[in-house]
Amino acid sequence: MRSVSARNPNYWKPGLPYLDEIEFIAIADEPSRVNALLSGDVHMINEVNPRSTTRIAASAKHRVVDAPSGNYTDLIIRQDQMPGKSPEFTEAMKYLLDREQVKSAVFRGYARVGNDHPIAPGSRYFNTDLPQRAYDPEKAKFLLKKAGMEKITMAVAASPAATGSVDIAVLLQQSAKQAGLTLNVNRLPSDGYWSNHWMKHPLSFGNINPRPNADVIFSQFFQSSAPWNESGWKNDQFDQLLLLARGETDDAKRAKMYGDMQTLVSQNCGIGIPVFISNIDGVDKRVQGYSSNPLGGFMGYMFSEQVWLDA
């Protein structure tokens, strides 16, 4: 499928855009997108797999654009059913996430370590005072024993639909062995995953795209009444802070509220966020003015008025 956009001579920003025409070509298969870029059939591609970055970087005519973002793949521990009803089990699962290994092995370094809440490092209101949860299988083992679950066997649902979740699940499975927990990875197809499996298992994975601000991400996924409250977590204190922050005009007080909400989510919610995943684009070096945007690939789909082609 192709779509062609032509320059609007009456565009409201004087002198923009630079290009006369842009052709969008739908290429669903990622290796095919990379091949199209390297062969010169297209000038830029998005959603590059980290494994493909070495091919692009090896080309003298192309470059990799790494855009840190708020996108994350999360471990979902349902709080409304066992074993997630146990706070010790939930905490143990978070200690079994080897974040540095997820960053390096799954995403080839194109990620930033997360701390089990949805506000990415560098974002406005990011809580820099919240201690980073470390990878600690021994502590997880202690917590599982305390919960009476040190030798249970259970499944964790993962799918290519949730970016990197299958690989993260395999790493989690290996870590769980050190704590005496047996996890069986249930790899599910992408087709139907979001409607049939997302949020419907005791242990599973989700994938959340960046939101423009803290209020949106907290309201859509962590408020007790939110329809996409992935883990079924309910916390009155969090809900009250969320409402108060919306009406607070003092930015320092609002920042404190959002910081407290991050602490509540990280310490109590049934969501484990090992890393925040970068958006990776591949670009022909002749394309000038191309930079990164945390809201998504193709400069948050705003590249059209910013770039030009140096022929």
Image: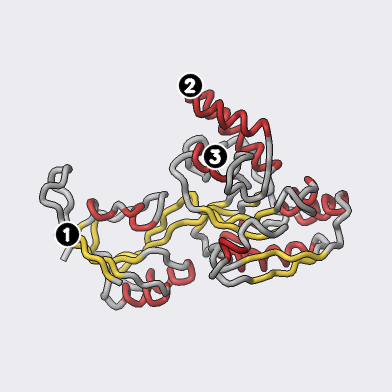
10 Å neighbourhood of mark 2: few (<14), some, or many (≥20)? few
On residue 108, the disc is none
* Amino acid type of the residue that numbered disc 3 sits on in the rendered structure: Ser
Nearer to me, 239 or 18: 239
Nearer to me, 240 or 172: 240
* Amino acid type of the residue that numbered disc 2 sits on in the rendered structure: Asp
In the picture of the structure, the residue carrying the numbered disc 1 is 6
* Amino acid type of the residue that numbered disc 1 sits on in the rendered structure: Ala
Of the two numbered discs 2 and 3 on the same chain, state the one appearing first in sequence: 3
Nearer to me, 46 or 111: 46
In the rendered image, residue 66, in percent from the top left (x then y), is placed at 41, 57
Q: Secondary structure at mark 3?
A: helix
In the picture of the structure, the residue carrying the numbered disc 2 is 250
Of the two numbered discs 3 and 1 on the same chain, state the one appearing first in sequence: 1
Q: Which quadrant of the figure contains the N terminus?
A: bottom left
- Up the image or down, 266 lies above or below 55; here it is above
Of the two numbered discs 2 and 1 on the same chain, state the one appearing first in sequence: 1
In the picture of the structure, the residue carrying the numbered disc 3 is 219
Nearer to me, 225 or 216: 225
Residue at the (21%, 60%) spot, across then down: 5
Q: CA distance from mark 2 to mark 3?
A: 20 Å
Is residue 250 rendered to the left or right of residue 41?
Answer: right
Q: Secondary structure at mark 2?
A: loop
- Up the image or down, 128 lies above or below 173; here it is above
Q: CA distance from mark 2 to mark 1?
A: 44 Å
The coloring applied to the image is secondary structure
Residue 52: quarter of image: bottom left
Is residue 143 rendered to the left or right of residue 292?
Answer: right
In the rendered image, residue 36, in percent from the top left (x then y), is placed at 32, 75
